[in-house]
Amino acid sequence: MKPTIEDALNLIRPDIAGMEPYTPIVPFEVLSEQLGRRPEDLVKLDANENPYGPSPKALAAMGKLDATAHIYPDPEARKLREALADYVGVGAEYIMAGAGADEIIDLLMRLFIQPGDGVINCPPSFGMYPFDAALHAANLIEVPRRADFSLDVEGIEWAAAQENVKLLLVCSPNNPDGGLIAPDDLDRLLRLPLIVVVDEAYIEFGGVGSASRRVSETPNLIVLRTFSKWAGLAGLRVGYGVFPLHFMEHLWKIKQPYNVNVAADAAARASLDDVETLMATVELLKAERERLAAELAAIPYLAPYPSRSNFILCRVDGIEAGELKHRLAEDYGILVRYYRKARLFDHVRFSVGKPEQTDRLIEALQAIGESL
Ligand SMILES: *Cc1c(COP(=O)(O)O)cnc(C)c1O
């Protein structure tokens, strides 16, 4: 007898069949249509993208792919990793490039996690950690951050003592609050018998050094970085991890061979050839962050948290945060991040934009304040 749809569905992995569906973000053009505004009239402050975009050198490099676009990329991304070695200050042999840091998170889980193994997450933090942990059927152990969003180190130490706990994921500066991990906290966490992954997607905005340089002498430290934010390449998907050498041969075994495409590779290398220009825009964004923070602090119903990143999280009091997000989008064409999550239900996050975008945001927030 022919198998039925049900028979076919029963072949899906039961843990995936039982998973909650992932809510993908609405694409920018679709949002623009829904809101009845042209994309160029929207102020996009919802995904921490770099409003200054890629370096001109990166754009030019992507225009010159005639000799390479039809050829598979180097599976080892040698040229990119060599350029990264200079930028990061570690040998190329410590670096693995990926289709965004997101791919590296997935690779980490593949390398360490068997079904049921423990992964410690410290929410609120980046949504991809629980997402990938679930995909790998990990036992997700949540150790919430304290009220000021610092890590609950004792709580993590307690969680780490459970059976088969393998990974701890911490983000610094943390998304969504923008705070840095305290150096003493990191030192303590590195003494735990598990892998400590420090996600430094926003480190270029942090004003502190990267933990990358500690990797060679720290057998359980992995650092994640990306071109998506500081270099304005979010749409191209290119990031990397810095790993202790003893993990590298195993990582190479599990990586998809052609994970970094030639356009992303060319743009990333050109960006590393234009660091000065890109760092000038990072400085602009850091200065704008301070101006935005001061402006937000003057809005009576908002309480911004100090940020070392390119976004500012605010507690909202006097209007529902979801309603605020909705009004900013519908009435002003300003997109911001709102979280339907326990700890953050009364918060919104604003990415730092260009000065004129800050002006539009602040005007809108003032107008909404007057209507309350
Ligand atoms: C944006 C972001 C990333 C994702 O980086 P990609 O390189 O674009 O995949 C990783 N971690 C955090 C905390 C982020 O906010």
Image (cartoon, rainbow, N blue to C red):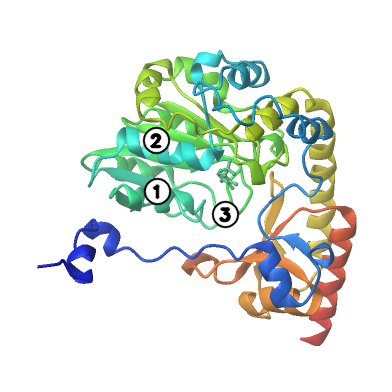
Residue occupying the point 66% across, 15% down:
86
Q: What is the three-letter code of the residue carrying label 1?
A: Asp
Instruction: Tell me whether the residue at label 2 lies in contact with that at label 1, contact meaning CB atoms closer than 8 angstroms.
Output: yes
Q: Which residue is mark 2?
A: 108
Query: In the current view of this chain or complex, which residue is farthest to the left?
Result: 1
367 up-or-down from 261: above or below: below
Q: How far apart, in angstroms, are the residues tagged by discs 3 and 1? A: 26 Å
Return the disc, 3 or 1, that comes first in the chain's sequence: 1
Question: Would residue 185 be visible to someone looking at this image?
Answer: no
Q: SS class of the residue under badge 3? A: loop
Q: Which residue is mark 1?
A: 132
- Assign the N terminus to one quadrant of the image: bottom left
10 Å neighbourhood of mark 2: few (<14), some, or many (≥20)? some
Q: What is the three-letter code of the residue carrying label 3?
A: Asp
Return the disc, 2 or 1, that comes first in the chain's sequence: 2
Residue occupying the point 56% across, 26% down:
73
Which one is in front in this view, the residue at disc 2 or the one at disc 3?
Answer: 2
Q: How far apart, in angstroms, are the residues tagged by discs 2 and 3? A: 29 Å
Q: Which residue is mark 3?
A: 148
Residue occupying the point 60% across, 39% down:
201
91 up-or-down from 286: above or below: above
